[in-house]
Image (spheres, grey):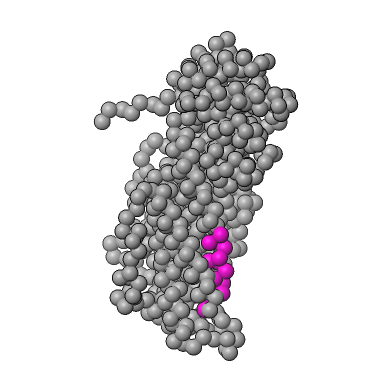
Amino acid sequence: MRQTRREFTPGALRALTAATTWKWGESGEYLRAEAVLLGLLEEEECRAAITLRECGIDAGRLLAEWPDLRRSSVPPPPYDAPLPPLHPDLQAGLAAIDALVDWGDWPAILSTEHLLLGLAAADHAVGAWLRAHGVDPAEILRRIHDRYGTSGRRTADRTEVAPPEPTPGGEAARDVSGGEAGSNGPETAAPRQSTGAADPSGPENRGRDEDRLPPEAAFRVMRVVDASANRAVEGLRVLEDYVRFVLDDPFLMGRLKDVRHELTACLEGLPLDVRLAARETLADVGTTVKGSQEARRQDLAQLVDANFSRVREAMRSLEEYAKLVAPDLAAAAERLRYRLYTLHRAVRRTGWARERLADARLYVLLDACASEAELATLCESLVQAGVHVIQLREKRLDDRTLIARARTVRRVTRGTDTLFIMNDRPDLAVLAEADGVHVGQEELSVKDVRTVVGPDRLVGVSTHDIEQARQAVLDGADYIGCGPTFPSATKRFEAFPGPAFLRQVAAEIRLPAFAIGGIHEGNLGMVLETGFRRVAVSSGITRADDPAAAAQRLLELLEPPAESPA
């Protein structure tokens, strides 16, 4: 008989509680399916959040799709508080779960994975959007069946095991259908499984019987695999903490967390009891041998480098030894190791660029003017006004004239706090001794630019959507231009990502980012509302009656808000 009573694991409860803080416009009457997706993402360690991130779905993408969702200023309710009325779409999602899962005679205890299954399988706009973005209900259902069995039970070695008894003193489960609330342990606590240890050198891992390792050799290999896996996971945690608490970077933190979660998922193929049996820390000769550099770190950069090296080395060891007992794990370790090379560069480049551009808020784009003298006069006035970056952007001049203009800008900015960036031309940037170069999506790649200008010059990239912004971070850019925000008097565009794009970037990317496109004193407030405090301006300054005065007014508006006294 179909269940009418639903209970939730603590992880699902936390996600639902977080969802209640998201309101649709001015209305908070219903708990909506879209808000539940945001709540699932906030429960970062849960299986549903991992699945959403694997499909490239994050809070920025959801808010771009449903911009009427707004975070309420009211604190979230306690976990045992009644849920608000459910929107019909969310009710349809719960009904979809019951249609797919046979609960048998047990209460319907829903995890975050069940919630995502219902939303993705339901016949409504949210479900269609999830499926279009790669969230496959059939795959989620398969994982649920693998974990709990086809009738709500967990299976281990083909033996059905009843769901765990309610945990004494556990968090109360919320009931959305009028039934008595129950109590459940944490979502991550699986029901008791068989204690029979799998053979790490068995046919399921090795293939033909004649290819098996002798048991003693397999056991020693498992000891190496366990130690390498532990080192990798520990190092990833250190790096996540740096990106989370020092860089405050949601995008890079998510990428590192994805690596850790994928590694952890791959390790599930090696039974934990086998790994623990092989572990022998007290007899490990390596615990007493320390390198001279292990006892101290000179700075955060050295800490980051050391831990990326530690993780990559552990991944390499894991890859090689797993080839003997778990080829699938070896292949995964290789893939993850290559991703870590890219993430190492992105993390370090982000930290370096943030220091280099820490005070850069106003970036002015200039054309070459009618003469070198006119350009020099304009640059001098902007430098004196306190402009942080000047870019020379000129498409009309021949190379000899353009390099002469570039050297003029360099002469004026040399020894000042104003950086000089050359547009599009890394070769001329080097010849003019510019501080960096800026390229668009159709110009040279960051890789090619870096080959010309070297590691010390800034490389900026124009981006027009969140995927381009993310890619620029991974490509090793030092800053990004984000826009066009508004129609511009100096450049024509067919589409305008506008402030919505700026909000996406502000929500997840900490690489220095400048809003660009049609920005002037009159609309700067709309930019600041997105969370941006860096702007690139052209005609809003250069076509003003007094460019220096216009720049100074913008600088005043861009000043960070004063901290309130303690």
Q: Is residue 27 shown to the viewer in this render?
A: no
12 or 46, nearer to the observer = 46
Is 399 placed left or right of 541 in the picture? right
For the stretch drawn in magenta, the main secondary structure is helix
| 332 in magenta | yes
Residue 528 is situated, as x and y percent measured from the top left of the image, at 48, 27
Is 24 placed left or right of 275 in the picture? right
At 65% from the left and 33% from the top, the residue drawn is 428
At 31% from the left and 78% from the top, the residue drawn is 283
Q: Answer with the quarter of the image where residue 183 lies.
A: bottom left
Is 158 placed left or right of 235 in the picture? right
241 or 2, nearer to the observer = 241
408 or 196, nearer to the observer = 408
Residue 85 is situated, as x and y percent measured from the top left of the image, at 46, 45
| 426 in magenta | no
Q: Quadrant of the C terminus?
A: top left
At 68% from the left and 32% from the top, the residue drawn is 495
Up-down relation of residue 162 to residue 496 (above or below): below
At 69% from the left and 29% from the top, the residue drawn is 493
Residue most toward the top? 545
Residue 300 is situated, as x and y percent measured from the top left of the image, at 38, 48
Residue 148 is situated, as x and y percent measured from the top left of the image, at 48, 70
What's the magenta region?
325-338
Up-down relation of residue 375 to residue 340 (above or below): above
Q: Answer with the quarter of the image where residue 65 lies.
A: top right
